Image (cartoon, grey):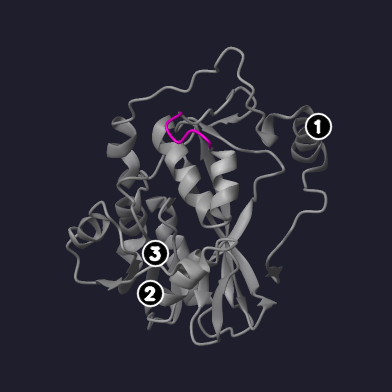
């Protein structure tokens, strides 16, 4: 059995993406790792190259603005890397997603178990969306709980829409549970870099007029709002993240008079999330971009 890791990235240094941690978190079980490195202006490609592992193959790309609509560039770049994978299974991590080392043996065992079971087209991961710092994560109903991150190769699977998931010929993949977490650090950055990341992300989904309207001042810090409605993380972070966590040099403080109204802090969302998490133990009307078969 051969496992291919793959990802895409651009300007990871400038925007504080833990790309090295993302790659090295799953590299121990990969036979190859394909990285689509966009035309960065901050040395990101050299950073990836400096990992210094022969299994890593870099594809240098130029991001085409025609794909800067609804995040389509993310899927296009994901597919650049995916289409070069030669393994039986393709293991995807985005530049802000990390896998805990404790889950790697079980993930490999799952891929071995279902290698010859063509009914299984992917593995479905649980998500921990860290927010503001490394001690809090989202449990609100407006944050997705599961996504596909391992897909079977050679069946026509492609990245879907803004690269949140995958489909085959436009149809949902048949998946089994990975019984592992994706540690998502996409909302953990110094406030100034969080603002720049938000602008960069919005620029891939909206036109310049929309971006300028919603980000009139590009120099302000991102307002995380209060963290008191989030879950407190009591577990351990992946080992590859320890150095970055130790370098954390900001603290999220609720700003007096802040007008920031994040959806997860709205009373209606908090109330319904509480009912779903504590009473029903399920999400009402949850969007599922997969078919769970086992």
Q: Does 161 sit left or right of 113 as displayed?
A: right
User: Label 1 neighbourhood size at 10 Å, few (<14), some (14-19), many (20+)?
Assistant: few
Indicate which disc, 1 or 2, sits on the residue closer to the N terminus. 2
Asked which secondary structure carries label 1, the reply is helix
Is 191 magenta? The answer is no
Q: Which residue does the image show at 48% across and 72% down from the upper left?
A: 76
Magenta part mainly helix, strand or loop? loop
Which numbered tag is attached to residue 4?
A: 2
Return the x and y of residue 249 as percentages of the image width and height.
33, 26
Depth check, front residue: 184 or 42: 42
Is 219 magenta? The answer is yes
- Looking at the rendered image, the disc whose residue lies closer to the viewer, 1 or 2, is 1
User: Label 2 neighbourhood size at 10 Å, few (<14), some (14-19), many (20+)?
Assistant: many
The residue range painted magenta reads 216-220
Residue 237 seen anywhere in this rendered image of the structure: yes
Q: Does 266 sit left or right of 58 as displayed?
A: right
Q: Image quadrant for the C terminus?
A: bottom right
Q: Image quadrant for the N terminus?
A: bottom left
Please give the residue where the numbered disc 3 appears in the rendered image: 8
Indicate which disc, 3 or 1, sits on the residue closer to the N terminus. 3
């Amino acid at each position: 059995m051969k496992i291919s890791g793959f990802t895409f990235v651009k300007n990871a240094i400038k925007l504080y993406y833990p790309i090295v941690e993302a790659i090295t978190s799953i590299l121990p079980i990969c036979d190859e790792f394909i990285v689509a490195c966009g035309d960065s202006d901050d040395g990101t490609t050299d950073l990836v190259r400096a990992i210094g592992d022969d299994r890593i193959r870099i594809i240098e790309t130029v991001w085409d603005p025609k794909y800067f609509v609804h995040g389509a560039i993310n899927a296009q770049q994901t597919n650049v890397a995916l289409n070069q994978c030669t393994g039986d299974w393709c293991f995807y991590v985005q530049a802000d997603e990390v896998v805990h080392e404790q889950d790697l043996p079980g993930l490999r065992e799952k891929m071995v178990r279902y290698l010859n079971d063509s009914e299984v087209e992917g593995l479905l991961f649980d998500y921990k969306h860290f927010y503001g710092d490394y001690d809090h994560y989202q449990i609100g109903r407006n944050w997705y709980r599961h996504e596909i991150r391992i897909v079977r190769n050679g069946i026509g699977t492609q990245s879907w829409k803004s690269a949140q998931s995958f489909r085959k010929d436009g149809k949902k993949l048949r998946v089994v549970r990975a019984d592992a977490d994706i540690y998502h650090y996409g909302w953990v950055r110094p406030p100034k870099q969080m603002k720049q990341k938000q602008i960069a992300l919005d620029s891939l989904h909206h036109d310049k007029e929309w971006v300028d309207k919603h980000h009139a001042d590009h120099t302000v810090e991102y307002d995380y709002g209060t963290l008191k409605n989030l879950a407190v993380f009591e577990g351990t972070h992946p080992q590859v993240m320890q150095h970055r966590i130790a370098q954390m040099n900001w603290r999220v403080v609720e700003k007096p008079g802040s007008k920031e109204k994040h959806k997860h802090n709205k009373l209606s969302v908090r109330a319904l999330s509480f009912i779903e998490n504590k009473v029903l133990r399920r999400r009402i009307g949850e969007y599922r971009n997969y078919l769970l078969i086992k």
